[in-house]
Image (cartoon, helix red, strand yellow):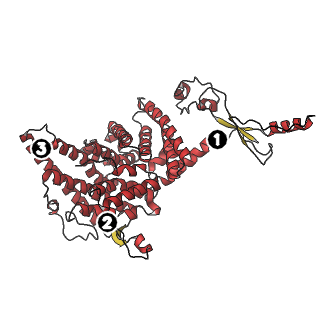
């Protein structure tokens, strides 16, 4: 027999495990803080205690008793009795770290599955799992891993444990941010990243995600572009540029990443490592500033003359950005010919009845990288077209900024720059990429990179359109199958305002 008992010490769990005296300061003890250790709090710890010897003594005493009254059942109260088929000499359960064992499972699952399908291993989860240089890095990673495991396996008690760890992680991260030596460290950046991704999974409103993405952006801005030239630091910047830009886009406030130094300095030493996707992210980082300027144009604070000047300058900036986006698209086609083609949808191939699918023909891609780049390009294009019709003219011709581009390129099934008949046609290109992104072997990574394009595509249709309803179903399915709960809220809140 083995009993799960409760410790009697009033100290924190960390000090009790280290067998040192705890000062019992709350919420975290000073001894742990001084030792740069994570204080695991004061929840009463359960431990396994060998009950076989006591049971044997109790049975022997009863057998020697002259009375024959029936033995009453022992009261369990708060103890849990676990029967063992082994004798006390063959099993030792005096101290079994189930919590640590489960944490290892959750973290391993996180590393293996959070970005399942990305061609190149994402370095920061691996780096964070081995980082002990700050008090917050491990507890933040544990909170993310526990919540992700609980959501992915629909285990409410594990999800609840992730919520509890989140509170501890916030306390620990705030403590690190107040430390003059650790506040701008790479370790703290990774902690903030973990909590940002936590909000993608725990999503209940945009507030939590916006706060974390904004805070992470401010932390990276304070570090400056020069601190992100080394490969490890640069990779963390690259992993966060889109999220930071989207947070600024949601607020309609320009992003510090639009500044020239943030587009050049991190790659100055190794310019060959700036990828096609990073050049596309440069354009995305310009979008929040254009949105802020458009919002200013709609305000009543401008006089007639100021309105005219502001509108002319903004129109030029929108046209210039659209021209840059088209040039990126031409460069992509030169470098990646025959990287996208049409195929029959898997659902059509599996059906014997007359197909009634909204998109019976879909896109296939040479790799997930190519698919991500094209869908992000189309999402940025949709935002620019909406701004162009709003600011320049409802009759704006999107082909005008493409007149200088070569006309002899074969774009396959995709629209050449400036030749999509309308915004809905661009949105349908995103819809036709969904099946590829959500294939089983790449579902989580594909879903993650598809979230923003899906949101912008949904905005291109009226809410009652069949395409909009289809997109809502896709985003609910992503939330159910990947754990990214943020997907479910993308059609119910003004996550990205652009009207």
User: From mark 2 to mark 3, how far is it between C-alphas?
Assistant: 39 Å
Query: Residue 404: image x %, image y %?
Result: 15, 63
Tags 2 and 3 touching, CB below 8 Å: no
Label 1 environment density (alpha carbons within 10 Å; few <14, some 14–19, many ≥20): few
Which element type, helix, strand or loop, lies under badge 1?
loop
Relative height, residue 108 to residue 251 (above, below): below
Percent from the top left, x then y, of residue 290?
21, 47
Circles 3 and 1: CB distance less than 8 Å? no
Q: Residue furthest front?
A: 69
**Residue pictured at 50% horizontal, 35% vertical:** 168
Q: Judge from the rendering whether residue 290 lies leftward or rightward of residue 413; answer left or right.
A: left
Q: State whether residue 429 appears in this view.
A: yes
Position in image of residue 221 (x %, y %): 32, 38
How far apart marks 3 and 1 lie (CA) works out to 64 Å
Q: For the point 10% across and 48% down, which residue is it?
A: 312
Name the side, left or right, on which 123 lies relative to 393. Answer: right
Residue 383, placed above or below residue 5 = below
- Asked whether the beta carbons under mark 1 and mark 2 sit within 8 Å of each other, the answer is no
Whichever of callouts 1 and 2 sits on the residue coming sooner in the sequence is 1
Of residues 407 and 174, which is closer to you in this image? 174
Circle on res. 310: 3
Q: Which residue is mark 2?
A: 336
- Residue reaching furthest to the right: 66
Q: Quadrant of residue 301?
A: top left
Query: Could you tell me which secondary element the residue under label 3 belongs to?
Result: helix
Where disc 2 sits, the SS reads loop
| Earlier residue among tags 2 and 3 | 3
Q: Earlier in the sequence, mark 3 or mark 1?
A: 1
Residue annotated with mark 1: 97
Examine the rendering and report whether any part of residue 134 can be seen: no
Q: Which quadrant is the N terminus positioned in?
A: top right
Q: Residue at x 28, y 71 (%)?
A: 412
């Amino acid at each position: 027999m083995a009993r799960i008992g409760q410790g009697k010490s009033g100290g924190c769990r960390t000090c009790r495990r280290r067998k040192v005296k705890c000062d019992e300061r709350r919420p975290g003890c000073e001894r742990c803080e001084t030792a740069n250790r994570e204080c695991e709090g004061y929840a009463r710890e359960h431990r396994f205690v060998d009950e076989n010897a006591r049971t044997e003594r109790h049975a022997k005493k009863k057998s020697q008793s002259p009375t024959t009254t029936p033995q009453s059942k022992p009261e369990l109260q708060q103890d849990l009795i676990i029967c063992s088929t082994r004798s006390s000499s063959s099993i030792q359960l005096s101290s079994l770290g189930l919590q640590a064992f489960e944490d290892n499972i959750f973290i391993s699952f996180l590393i293996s599955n959070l970005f399942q399908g990305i061609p190149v291993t994402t370095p920061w989860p691996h780096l964070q799992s081995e980082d002990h240089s700050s008090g917050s890095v491990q507890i933040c990673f544990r909170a993310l891993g526990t919540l992700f495991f609980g959501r992915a396996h629909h285990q409410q008690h594990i999800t609840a444990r992730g919520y509890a760890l989140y509170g501890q992680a916030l306390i620990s991260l705030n403590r690190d941010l107040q430390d003059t030596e650790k506040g701008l460290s790479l370790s703290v950046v990774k902690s903030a990243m973990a909590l940002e991704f936590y909000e993608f999974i725990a999503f209940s409103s945009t507030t939590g995600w916006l706060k974390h993405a904004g805070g992470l952006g401010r932390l990276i801005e304070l570090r400056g572009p020069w601190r992100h030239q080394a490969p490890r630091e640069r990779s963390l910047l690259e992993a966060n540029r889109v999220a930071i830009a989207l947070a600024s886009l949601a607020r309609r406030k320009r992003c510090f990443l639009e500044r020239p130094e943030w587009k050049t300095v991190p790659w100055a030493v190794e310019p060959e490592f700036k990828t096609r996707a990073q050049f596309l992210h440069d354009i995305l980082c310009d979008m929040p500033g254009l949105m802020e300027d458009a919002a200013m144009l709609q305000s009543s604070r401008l006089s007639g003359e100021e309105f005219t000047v502001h509108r002319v300058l903004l129109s030029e900036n929108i046209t210039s950005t659209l021209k840059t986006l088209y040039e990126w698209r031409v460069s992509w086609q030169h470098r990646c010919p025959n990287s996208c083609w049409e195929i029959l949808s898997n659902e059509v191939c599996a059906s014997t009845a007359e197909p009634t699918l909204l998109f019976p023909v879909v896109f296939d891609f040479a790799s997930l990288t190519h698919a991500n780049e094209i869908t992000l390009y189309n999402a940025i294009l949709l935002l620019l077209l909406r701004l162009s019709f709003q600011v320049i003219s409802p009759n704006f011709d999107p082909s005008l900024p493409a007149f200088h581009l070569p006309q002899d390129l074969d774009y396959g099934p995709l629209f050449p720059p400036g030749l999509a008949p309308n915004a809905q046609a661009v949105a349908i290109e995103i819809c036709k990429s969904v099946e590829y992104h959500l294939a089983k072997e790449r579902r989580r990574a594909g879903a993650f990179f598809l979230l923003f394009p899906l949101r912008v595509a949904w905005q291109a249709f009226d809410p009652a359109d069949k395409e909009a309803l289809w997109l809502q179903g896709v985003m609910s399915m992503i939330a159910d199958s990947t754990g990214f709960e943020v997907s479910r809220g993308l059609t119910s809140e003004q996550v990205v305002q652009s009207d």
